Amino acid sequence: MSSHGNDPRQPSAAKPYVAPVIAPQDLPIDYAGFIAVIFGVAGVMFRYKLSSWLALIFCAQSIANMRNVENDLKQVMMAMMFSIMGLITNYFGPPRPGGKQS
């Protein structure tokens, strides 16, 4: 590190990075949001607790990685409502038919 005189970099030629502008329709698919919707619907329809919990986790992941707020927020909110409805019906609703009798 003692050879500062031989440094080939040119500070005057350095330019700050500017992210390219990408159209909303060209953004990659939000797989976490899609999986959250699938698990949320399965949690509500089939009353699977694990499916509702997984939908909630995938919702959190989708919110953390959200790039296009206008389009992604609708999908994430729908998935979150399905997962919350599934959790409420699983824990506070009537017991599943054919379940354990106590």
Image (spheres, grey):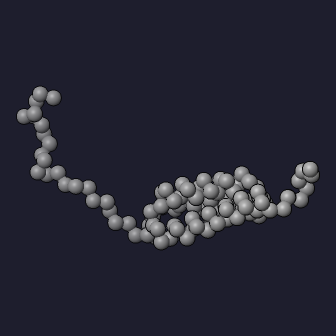
Is residue 101 at least partly visible in the picture?
yes
Which quadrant holds residue 67?
A: bottom left
Tell whether 65 sits left or right of 34: left
Q: How many numbered circles does the render carry?
A: 0
Q: Which quadrant of the figure contains the N terminus?
A: top left
Q: Position of residue 42 (x, y in %)?
A: 73, 60
Q: Residue furthest left?
A: 5
- The answer to whether 90 is drawn above or below residue 6 in the figure is below
Residue 82: x and y in percent read 67, 65
Q: Front-most of 66 and 90?
A: 90
Residue at left offset 92%, top offset 50%:
102
Side of 49 relative to 54 (left or right): right
Left or right of 33: which side holds 53?
right
Which residue is at a point 11% across and 51% down the rendered structure image?
12
Q: Position of residue 77 (x, y in %)?
A: 58, 67
Which residue occupies 13% across, 47% down?
11
Residue at (84% x, 62% y) in the render: 94
Can the viewer see residue 38?
Answer: no
Q: Nearer the viewer, residue 67 or 53?
A: 53
> In this rendering, would 53 be left or right of 77?
right
Vertical comparison of 16 with 5: above or below: below
Where does the image place residue 39, in percent across and percent down from the top left? 68, 58
